[in-house]
Amino acid sequence: MSNQPRVLSGIQPTGESMQLGNYLGAVRNWVQMQDGFDAYYCVVDLHAITLDPPEPAALRQRTRIVAAQLLAAGLDPDRCALFVQSHVPEHPQLSWVLECLTGFGEASRMTQFKDKSAKAGVDRQGVGLFTYPILQAADILLYQADQVPIGEDQRQHLELTRNLAQRFNARYGQTFVVPEAYIPKGAAKILDLQDPTAKMSKSRPEAGTVYLSDEPAVITKKVRRAVTDTDGEIRYDPERKPGLSNLLAIHAAFTDAGIDSVEKEFSGQGYGALKNAVAESVIAFAQPFAARSRELLDDPAELDRILAKGAERARALASVTMADAYAKVGFLPAVVG
Ligand code: ATP
Ligand code: LTN
């Protein structure tokens, strides 16, 4: 086993493709952190049935799509364990123990739960949406992760995870590493192009979300129609000019430039020039990315082999933590033979 610090993160197989915010807010860091970390990355299919459960065939397909896209983004199965959450039964097993340590009020304060349940009405949601962050905590704690690369929207879930780790350790003795959130500057919260008060998300309307599988013409159209403001000044000011600042942040991230240098470059020009440049920088990434994802998806047997190997590595680690946690809680060991 590696002596390097460990990293774990997850992404839901919701939608037919990753969106730009997933990549810039999280996945780009996953790729970088393969160097210098013992890396575990997970397609969280158990989480993907918490809201509007998809058709079974669609869930299977989306799970493969996300896996292919993660590889296309630069994950290397020789340098990280890429696996599917439902292949490692320890996740829901540990989740149960953590649920019993979580306060009802504590879980009720999770803003993602409040937002998502408010949309369809609390009484119409399954309990899984409520316990979602606790399963996420189990995902992280099972691997004794030191760092968790995520977007800003997941900060509160990581805080809950840290509290649960500390609570378990205080009650039963040192068991879990208390993880740190790794949240990028600048691209931590990419906003919806049509509604720059909301984060871009796979589950929001098409027009405001750039999918990395979108055709170049579609990307250009979505970016050109992005909602900005009417003062005509190119200036990074997320409070007063959220739409325009979002475009500056996207361009800076895709061209590996600082936001202030992008601001300077376009200062005095019209919004149209900036939008064209943003569309170009997104397409320069998305086009080869989409082509590579399609190639990988054309060989589902190979994808499944990569995921099986990832799950094997994940289980080797998760089962050790799980056995320790169960023993600490006082569950009687099952005698084999
Ligand atoms: P859904 O709409 O189904 O909730 P999502 O698009 O919000 O999905 P997730 O699969 O829940 O994406 O998130 C995967 C990772 O991408 C998480 O680390 C999350 O913080 C990050 N992320 C999602 N949207 C954004 C965004 N708009 N900006 C920055 N990071 C984001
Ligand atoms: N809830 C996360 C997805 C997720 C996750 C994780 C992220 C599930 N398990 C473990 C980091 C670590 C989201 O992005 N909505």
Image (tube, grey):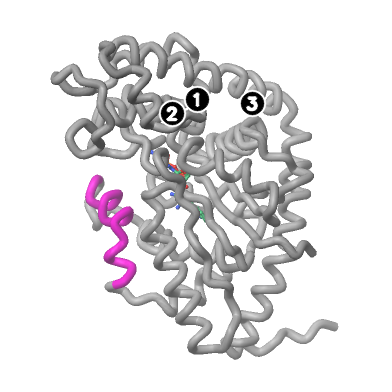
Image coordinates of residue 245 in percent, x first then y, are 29, 30
Instruction: Identify residue type, mark 2.
Output: Ala
Under mark 3, the amino acid is: Ser
Q: Which residue is mark 3?
A: 293
**Where 201 falls versus 293 (above or below)?**
below
Disc 3 and disc 1 in contact, CB within 8 angstroms: no
Determine whether label 1 and label 2 are within 8 Å by CB: yes
Q: Which residues are magenta?
A: 106-119
Q: Which residue is mark 1?
A: 255
Q: Is residue 96 left or right of residue 207?
A: right
Q: Nearer the viewer, mark 3 or mark 2?
A: 2
**At label 1, which amino acid type do we have?**
Thr
- Quadrant in which the C terminus appears: bottom right
Q: Is residue 249 above or below residue 314?
A: above
Q: Residue furthest right?
A: 337
Q: Quadrant of residue 7?
A: bottom right
Name the residue tied to disc 2: 252
Q: CA distance from mark 1 to mark 2?
A: 5 Å
Q: Indicate which disc, 3 or 1, sits on the residue closer to the N terminus.
A: 1
Q: Residue 227 placed where, x, y %?
A: 23, 22
Residue 124 position, x and y percent, is 27, 53
Alpha carbon distance from label 3 to label 2: 24 Å
So how many labels did they put on this image? 3
Percent position of residue 267, x then y: 29, 18
